[in-house]
């Protein structure tokens, strides 16, 4: 039987996927530690890979989707 990957399934509450939610969580935590300053992408990636097996390109794609206001688009 084929297993289903729930990481890319949008949540009905806000349309965010699990991966997007983790990226936002890590970004929030890093910004708090840096007193509201911008978080370098490399620093964010280092924190995200502690939770997810994700490539740098996947992170860039997620960040672009979040910035554009179009989360959970069809990949």
Image (cartoon, rainbow, N blue to C red):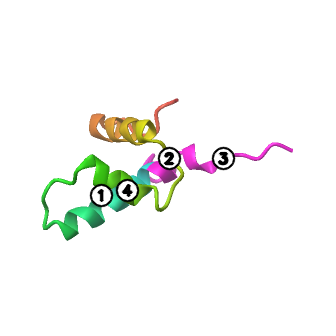
Q: CA distance from mark 2 to mark 3?
A: 14 Å
Q: Quadrant of residue 27?
A: bottom left
How far from the left and from the top, in percent, is residue 31?
A: 21, 62
> Which is more foreground, mark 4 or mark 1?
4
Prevalent SS, magenta region: loop
Element under disc 2: loop
At horizontal 13% and vertical 67% (from top left) the residue drawn is 35
Is residue 37 shown above or below 73?
below
SS for dot 3:
loop
Asked whether 57 or 74 is in front, the reply is 57
The residue indicated by pointer 4 is 46
Q: Which residue is mark 2?
A: 54
* Residue 32 placement (x, y as % from top left): 21, 68
Which of pointers 3 and 1 lies earlier in the amino acid sequence? 3
Q: CA distance from mark 3 to mark 4?
A: 23 Å
Residue drawn at x 50%, y 46% is 54
Residue 58 numbered mark, or none: none
Question: Which of the two labelled residues, at mark 2 and mark 4, occupies the earlier sequence position?
Answer: 4
Look at the image and give the residue range highlighted in magenta.
1-19
For the point 35% across and 55% down, which residue is it? Answer: 24
On screen, 48 above or below 62? below
Identify the image quadrant of residue 39.
bottom left
């Amino acid at each position: 039987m084929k297993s289903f990957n729930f990481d890319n399934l949008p949540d009905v509450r806000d349309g965010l996927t699990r991966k997007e939610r983790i990226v936002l969580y890590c970004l929030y935590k890093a910004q708090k530690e840096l007193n509201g300053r911008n978080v370098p992408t490399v620093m964010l990636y280092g924190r995200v890979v502690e939770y997810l097996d994700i490539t740098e390109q996947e992170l860039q794609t997620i960040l672009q989707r979040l910035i554009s206001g179009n989360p959970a688009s069809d990949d």
